[in-house]
Image (cartoon, grey):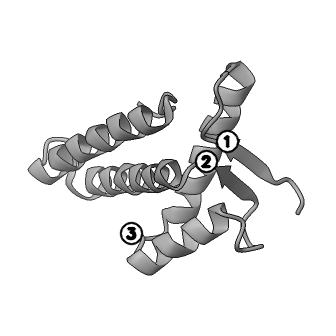
Amino acid sequence: MENTIVVDLSVETMNESWLTMFGSAIKYMLNRMFGKMPSDSQIADIKKAFLKESQESNIIIKGTQAQIDQLIQTLAKEKNYMVHYMEHGLSDDRTREAKQELYTAIAEFEKATNLIWPLK
């Protein structure tokens, strides 16, 4: 597959180029998701693509199932916050709640992977 991005969530040594690649991969995934809120079946499709069960994706995520699940949950919360912000503004209670849910997901992702979430 051309231009395949491989992200290993179990990496023990991070450097600047790895962090740049990880941030780019997150940006790419959010761009793919941003058409609308992902349904459960779309999340399952994203998981399949990450696990290399689908040839449609040009990004492969490696790691434990828990790490991959946490990445997907955090991406969904990131998108949810963006949608609320765009639809309701920053001061709306729904946006603030979505932001708190995102921060919780980020903390859980960082704990599960020992990686820093690139979008804060």
The picture places residue 40, in percent across and down from the top left corner, at 40, 76
- How far separated are the C-alphas under marks 1 and 3? 26 Å
Tell me which residue sits at (69%, 19%) in the image.
15
Give the crowd class for mark 1: few <14, some 14-19, many >=20 residues within 10 Å: some
Most foreground residue, 69 or 98: 69
Mark number displayed over residue 63: 2
**In 3D space, how far apart are the residues under numbered discs 3 and 2 (Cα atoms)?**
25 Å
Using residue 120 as the reference point, say whether residue 16 is left or right of it.
right
Report the mark closest to the observer, 3 or 2.
Answer: 2
Q: Residues within 10 Å of mark 3 (few under 14, many from 20)?
A: some
Q: Residue at x 58, y 63 (%)?
A: 32
Residue at the far left in the pictured view: 93
In the drawing, what numbered circle is on residue 8? 1
Expressed as whole percent of the image width and height from the top left, the position of residue 80 reads 33, 57
Q: Amino acid at mark 2?
A: Gly
User: Mark 1 near mark 2, Cβ–Cβ under 8 Å?
Assistant: yes
- Image mark for residue 60: none
Amino acid, disc 3 = Met
Q: Residue at x 20, y 55 (%)?
A: 88
Amino acid on which disc 1 is placed? Asp
In the rendered structure, which disc, 3 or 2, sits on the residue that comes first in sequence? 3
Residue drawn 60% across the image and 36% down it? 23
Tell me the CA gap for discs 1 and 2: 6 Å
- List the residue tagged with mark 3: 37
Left or right? Give the position of 83 relative to 64: left
Count neighbours of disc 2 (C-alpha within 10 A) and say few if under 14, some if 14 to 19, many if 20 or more: some
Mark 1 secondary-structure assignment: strand
In this rendering, is residue 72 above or below 97? below
Apparent side of residue 47 relative to residue 57 in the rendered image (left or right) = left
